[in-house]
Image: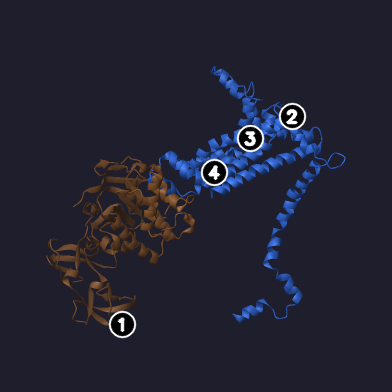
Amino acid sequence: MSEKLIDLKDITKKFDNTVVLDDFNLYVRENEFVTLLGPSGCGKTTTLRIIAGFETPDKGSVIFEGKDITNLPPNKREVNTVFQKYALFPHMTIAENIAFGLRIKNKSREYIQDKIKYALKLVNLEGYENREPDSLSGGQQQRIAIARAIVNEPKVLLLDEPLGALDLKLRQDMQYELIRLKNELGITFLYVTHDQEEALTMSDIIVVMNQGYIQQIGTPTDIYNEPQNAFVADFIGDSNILQGTMIRDELVEILGTRFVCVDKGFGENKPVDVVIRPEDIDLVKPEDGIIDGVVTDVIFKGVHYEMCVMARDFEFIVHSTDCFPVDSKVGISVEPFDIQIMNRPQSEDEKAVEIDV
Amino acid sequence: MSEIIQKNIPPDAGAGGGAALMVSPRKKAKLLAAPYSIWAAGFIIIPLIMVLYYGFTAANGSITGANVAAIFSPVNLKALMLSILFSLVSTLLCLIIAYPVAVILAGFGRGKSGFLSLIFILPMWMNSLLRTIAWQNLLERKGVINAFLSSVNLPELYIINKPPAIILGMVYDFLPFMILPIYNAVSKIDPDLIHAAKDLGANGFQTFTKVLFPLSLPGVISGITMVFVPALTTFVISDILGGGKILLIGNVIEQLFTQDSDWNAGAGLSVVLMIFIVISMYFTEKYDGGEK
């Protein structure tokens, strides 16, 4: 495992008595693509701005390569930011924008020219040197913003919802583009987004945040398949979240019926939250499943059908390529390893302790 | 649907009635612009023609260039040069004072800008003549300021009737006209541009010279025009704070009209002044355009 590059220790930040980050701890290793994911107001952008130096934490420290940089101004930090709305200098050409950081550092004319060429090639915008930022499309401007940041060879590239202002198709293209860039440059990307699909596609590590706390840290597969609590399960993709009781190891009771599962170590007769992903539910003939239900709604989604199945007063969302018409009686069947058991916090205190990873 | 359309345009509507209602958009625009055209003609174009007429004719009505050429008389030339000098100095002072204020007002200083903006806007609610007279009282040899200075055993200030008093008056009167356009320009700048500059390694001074100032330039230029032009033509400030001892070009023109009743000579010098204003506006416009 490589070194810790950024280490945030006990960061607390308040804006007008609203706590945005509370005793926040997070470290980022070299050469990782780390995504801070969460709804708006969860503190993800504030975290990024604290690392960039635009905000100072009320408490705690920012360690960069072992040195405390909490009070270092942004211009002295070895990080560069890509802003959501690009923030290209409108009074400069593309070349001047890219050269900005290098000119400040008094690099030679030849070095700057080479770097501009290299950066434009990297973002597939060769020949755009003398264009004005306003004459470029949103996607092109964003590429230039990335080029302007990376010519400075930062140790970390901070990206604040950089694809938020682009349309869907462009956003998907740019996701591949960013993965490619990260692999070519070999630098750490710290990415902020509220879009779970973006996070799942690009990240090595996802940090799910809510209300200033980290909810879960893990690889995209971990986060999706084994959410640690109901918030994560709900935020990442569609899910059926049910309240259940852990009878004993590998046996859970949901809606009055006992399901075999693979989770252990929750104790006996403990209340838990249970997540079943819509695509993990098999609809079978009535009596063949574990619980019987009635289809109440069917929507065709292209890749699959999305069906609502009412079973014992709980509405399951089911994704399947087979279509069951409305009002048909079905059986619900789930494989044991598709049932994900999560601790249910019993109090606010426990909630805080649990998510303070 | 078709019924509604038929109701709107009765089939038996006469051709004449229809034509009166169906005014082309172009004509409609002209009609709407009529009040402004009348205003512009009555209060701008016609007076301008009259100034030009008086400026280029002698008292007996014959055409002459003497009124305009009178600017080259030593007294008039000195007044014009003094006017230009005073307006340049006060414009520069206004810029130096106004810029930081505008930046703070725009919220870049993160201060409480509401009270501050009130401080700078409030004097504009008062008549400028009154404000100038107030300064006269403050600056007088036995005025408020000197009374205070002598009471605390400090040397007294004798700037009344001297150039510094006039420049002070100009700066005080015209400062809001510098602050407002700069404030407008600065408040439109995306704060992330400032962040981006710092993020790329620029210190405070570099951020100012490379990003903040260039982006606020349109505001600076309209501020300069809005201060320089009235400062160049003022006669009230120099009259009150200069004690009639310092003649600016505005005072010369005013005296020609009011004391000498020589409208032709006054108009002639006004034409010269207008030429200077047009030239200065041309340069500021050109500089503004060149930056874009």
| Dot 3 crowding, Cα within 10 Å, few <14, some 14–19, many 20+ | many
Disc 4 to disc 2, how far (Cα)?
A: 38 Å
Amino acid bearing label 3: Ser
Whether label 3 touches label 2, CB < 8 Å: no
Q: Which residue is mark 2?
A: B74
* Residue at point 68%, 32% (across, down): B81
Callout 3 and callout 2 share a chain: yes
Q: Earlier in the sequence, mark 4 or mark 3?
A: 3
Q: Nearer the viewer, mark 3 or mark 2?
A: 2
Whether label 4 touches label 2, CB < 8 Å: no
* Secondary structure beneath label 1: loop
Q: Which residue is mark 4?
A: B182
Q: Which residue is mark 3?
A: B87
* Residue at point 54%, 36% (across, down): B96
In this view, the residue in front, A65 or B189, is A65
Whether label 4 touches label 3, CB < 8 Å: no
Seen as rendered, the residue at the extreme right is B60
Chain coloured brown: A
Callout 4 and callout 3 share a chain: yes
* Residue at point 53%, 47% (across, down): B185
For residue B219, side relative to residue B198 (left or right):
right
In which image quadrant can residue B58 be found? top right
Chain coloured blue: B
A301 above or below B272?
below
Is residue B195 visible in the rendered structure shown here? no
Q: Earlier in the sequence, mark 3 or mark 2?
A: 2
Q: Which chain does the numbered disc 4 sit on?
A: B
Amino acid bearing label 1: Pro
Amino acid bearing label 4: Ile
Q: Which chain does the numbered disc 2 sit on?
A: B
Callout 1 and callout 2 share a chain: no
